[in-house]
Every structure is written in C-alpha cells, then in structure tokens.
Amino acid sequence: MMVDDDRDSVSIVWDCGTAQVQRLGGMLGPVWFTLPDGRKIQPFAIAPWADDETPEHAALPGIMRRLRGEWPCVPFGAPSAPGGLPESWRGAPVNSVDPEFHGHSSHHVWDVVEQGDDFVVLSIAYPDAHPIRRLTRKISGRPGAATIDCELTIEARKDVTTTIALHPVFRLADEAGQSEIVADFKFGRVLPFDLEPGVSRLTPDAEFTDLNHVPAKTGFLSLQRLPFEFDTEELVQLCHAGSPVRLIDHCEDYEISLQHDRYLFPSVLLWISNRGRTQYPWNGRFTALGVEPLHGAFDLGPDIGAWPENPLAKSGVSTAIKLTAGEILNTSYSISVSGL
C-alpha cells in the first residue's frame, strides 16, 4: 500500500547544484549539477511510473513505487536464493536475514534527523528482530564543485554475515551507443541465469575480461557502449574492480564519476535495463544503467553471498561482509559530473 509519505522529499542547494532526497527508500534524485560553462545536468534515472496514481501502482513494493537515483541496500539482493540456479550455485544454507529484496531500508520511509541548506541527514531503524539496527546517511553538496558527497553508517544489532551495496542508477544517452562505461576490473561474470527469461542475450555464468567482448548466446556482445538498439536486460559483476567508475555521455558531452571505497566494495555490479521488461510498471520504456559498488554475489542475496562455496567466493572474490553485534561501519563516496 502507498503511504502518505511516499512523495515526501527534502531539498538541498549548494553553489554548484540542487538535489532532491526522497524519504521513501532514502533515494537521492533528481540532482541538477551546474557545470562551469553554465549547463545544468541531471544524470540520474527517474522511473517514468513514479507519479502514477492507480491501484496497480499502489500495490508495488516500496522500492519500485518511486524508483530513482541512488540509495544504499543493506542487505543487498534477494531474501533467499532464487530458483533455477545451476548446480554450482546451489547449496547455500537458508538464514533469511531480511524478507525484502535489497533490504528493509529500500522499501520504507526514512526519518530526516538534521538538515541545512546544503546537506541532509536521514536515518531508518530496522525491525527489532533484524540483525541490522539502523542505517544513517548524510548527503551534501560539495562547495565549489559539481559533486554530491555521501556518508553511510551501518549499525549492527547482532553478529551477521551479509551483503551490502550502493545502488546508483543513471540515465543513458538518447542515441544508441552514446553512453560509454569506463571501469577497471580483473574479470567479470554474467549472472548465472537469464535476468529476463527469453530476453537476456548474454551467456549465463560466463566469465570475461573485456567489456567489449562478453560471451553471448550468439557470439559476443560489447557492453561498453550503451544503450543498445535492441531490447534486453543484463546483469554482470565486475570483480576486483577499481574506483572511480565513469560513465560518459557523448550526446550531451558530460561525464559522471562514481568514487567509492573499493576495499569495502570489491565488486561493481552493472545492471543494464534496456527496455527488456514489458510488464507493469516497466512497460518496455525503462532504459538505465545501475553502477552498483557491491560486497556480494550479484543480487542473489545474503544467503548465497555468505556461502563460502559459491563460485565467485571460490575464485577469490569476497562476497559477504561480517559485522559483529554493536559494530558501527562507516563509508563515504561521491558522485561528480564534469563537462567533456
């Protein structure tokens, strides 16, 4: 059910931009960055269904109703291991850390605990039985720069081994192939099943070392230049990934730079949504790129991430983080826009 607070947001303003922060999901976006040449760039994807007023929309999960911009996910991924996994991905013990996809905080309304002209601090308490006690995030405009700085604090209530991620979703250029991903990584892996059955084109569970040469069901596919002319949905994990990750828009001549802690988030998940989902609310109209710093195994959730026998963990990729009762984990990251 939609709640009255779904559309509640707060604004921050600084000398190089303005931003909206939505209380539902603690989602950042839209953000208008002002470049030195006077241009204003809004780089985030905003769901085209966000303002629908129908029973169908009201019945959507909280994370979906007004999907936008960037937000943290603790835990990250599915509540339990999905069906249809290949044999090598099966066998994880079931712990059911969180019943909601991408975690409690992605679906519920955050509290505004402090606000100034150029910053806001939000917090959300988790249910009493949850191993996570609270998330707090501070979002600030950086003086003199077209940059948003974010700080995230995770407070653990109990000992837990779980997955965490940041979830920026950026809009893509209007013309095919005019958004360019620039990312350093040791190797990548494709989700071990079709993200969208009958639509996804990459070879499930395939490995690669070059975004320009990713195994597909009919040869190879380049993921470096987006969007595609064809419709698809893809998910790939870049392992031992560096920071920053950059996204260049060659139509509007600007570049996004996502700077994060590559040790806390040793992978980056690329979610390519290219009009491949036709059911409501997607309706074949959503084109965006998720660039998601990750400590996990795809979006398969904490059960598989915490399982040391999952194929990524066995290949030397850390896919879960251990938190102890009472621990407070802090991380900071930034999103900047510059002209070409």
Image (spheres, grey):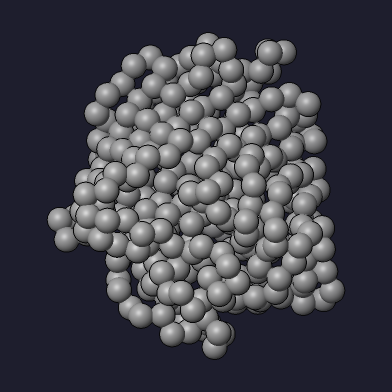
Residue 112 lies left or right of residue 47; in this view the side is: left
Residue 278, can we see it?
Answer: no
| Residue located at (77% from left, 57% from top) | 211
Q: Quadrant of the N terminus?
A: bottom left
Q: Is 127 displayed left or right of 331 in the figure?
A: left
Above or below — where is 329 with respect to 256?
Answer: below
* Residue 29 appears in the rendering: yes
Q: Residue 188: give x, y in percent of width and height.
A: 68, 63
**Which of the image's four quarters has the C terminus?**
top right
Comparing 244 with 315, the one in front is 315
Which of 65/292 is in front?
A: 292
Residue extending furthest toward the left: 128
Residue 22: quadrant of the picture = top left
> Where in the figure is residue 107, as x and y percent of width and height?
33, 52
Depth check, front residue: 1 or 299: 299
Measuring from the top left, give residue 25's x and y in whole percent: 36, 45
In this picture, is 236 found above or below 197?
above
Residue 16: image quadrant is top right
Q: 22 or 49, which lies in front?
A: 22
Image-based side of 155 in relation to 45, left or right: left
